[in-house]
Amino acid sequence: MKLLTLNCHSHIEENYEHKLSVLAKGIAETCPDVIALQEVSQSVNSKILQAVVQEYFPCEKNIAVREDNAVHCLCEQLKAHGKRYYRTWYPIKLGYGRLEEGIAVLSLSPIKRVYRINVSQTESHDNWRRRVILGIKTAECDDAFFSVHFGWWGDDSEPFEKQWNKTLEFLPKRQRVWLMGDFNSPAEIRNEGYDLISGSGFYDTFVIAESKDSGKTAKGSIDGWKNNGITDMRIDGIWTSNCESISVISSRTVFNGTDRETVSDHFGVLAEISDIGGRKQ
């Protein structure tokens, strides 16, 4: 099983259309089983799609998917590469005055269930600090796969710690959970978000991987960290609630300028997991 996570920074990126095509080609070539995407946006003034494709699994009623929705456009390009992905998407908040910034999960296997958890204190679509995690259960696996994008440790109004505790409260309890995304908690900093996650019984697949690279997913100073003086961080990752019966064969960054062009201010993380316990995987 291959898992990919990427903070797309979609419509904000320069040469966005080109980068979307690079992303689609890279996904088609690596063929991850489940993909978690963050900052997957659409323009508020773009036309609403009159008919949503059958691979789309709505996480709730009356969500408007627009013609320039980043995950819709990505999946249409993937079809051109011969890859069919099922997906769900949720618009979290308004951003930059012109975008609905959302979160998405894609799967090669049909989606059977969707989980949507508001983990921030605010539930206002107009508040840029709002945070929602989105998960799926597929037809091929008993596990739950979540795309996550948390706030910062030092945010007085929306601290990471409160968002994490709310996440733990509402996550499924009877199955293995995978958390994939932008945690905004550098692995290099002790006694903050990273240590809170690992101290909550979750396992960092990068740490337990048999083969790995440096793991750095943000080079230089990026949005949200430009005033912190922190650079070259490992803030994106893939965590699991249970590492029994699996082996993490490899963890590596992709779309990093070496393994394919960069497509965002974040690099992607691609992990390959082997089932060694006979479970449906």
Image (cartoon, rainbow, N blue to C red):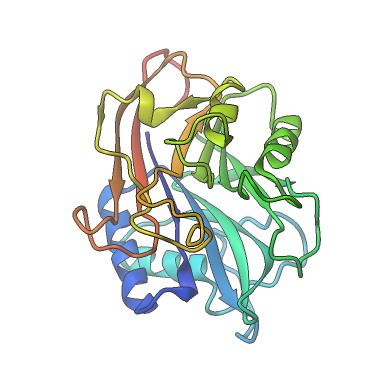
Q: Quadrant of the N terminus?
A: top left
Any part of residue 215 in sight: yes
Q: What residue occupies the far left of the structure in this picture?
A: 258
Q: Quadrant of residue 210?
A: top left
On screen, residue 97 versus residue 248, left or right, reads right
x and y percent of residue 185 in the render?
A: 52, 42
Q: Quadrant of the C terminus?
A: top left
Which residue is at the front of the view, 209 or 135? 209
Relative height, residue 134 to residue 238 (above, below):
below
Q: Which of 192 and 71 lies nearest the eye of the viewer? A: 192
The quadrant in which residue 13 appears is: bottom left
Identify whether 179 is placed above or below 108: above
Image coords of residue 12 (percent x, y): 47, 75
Judged left or right of residue 91, residue 15 is left
* For residue 200, side relative to residue 15 (left or right): right
Do we see residue 142 in this rendering?
A: no
Name the residue: 64% across, 46% down: 154
Q: Is residue 178 above or below residue 124?
A: above
Query: In the rendering, at what x and y percent does residue 207 appear?
Result: 37, 26
Question: Which quadrant of the view contains residue 273?
Answer: top left
The answer to whether residue 14 is left or right of residue 124 is: left
**Residue depicted at x 30% and y 46%:** 253
Residue 204 at what x, y percent from top left? Answer: 45, 28
Question: What residue sits 50% from the left and 55% below the top?
Answer: 228
Instruction: Count how many numbered circles sit on residues in the image.
Output: 0
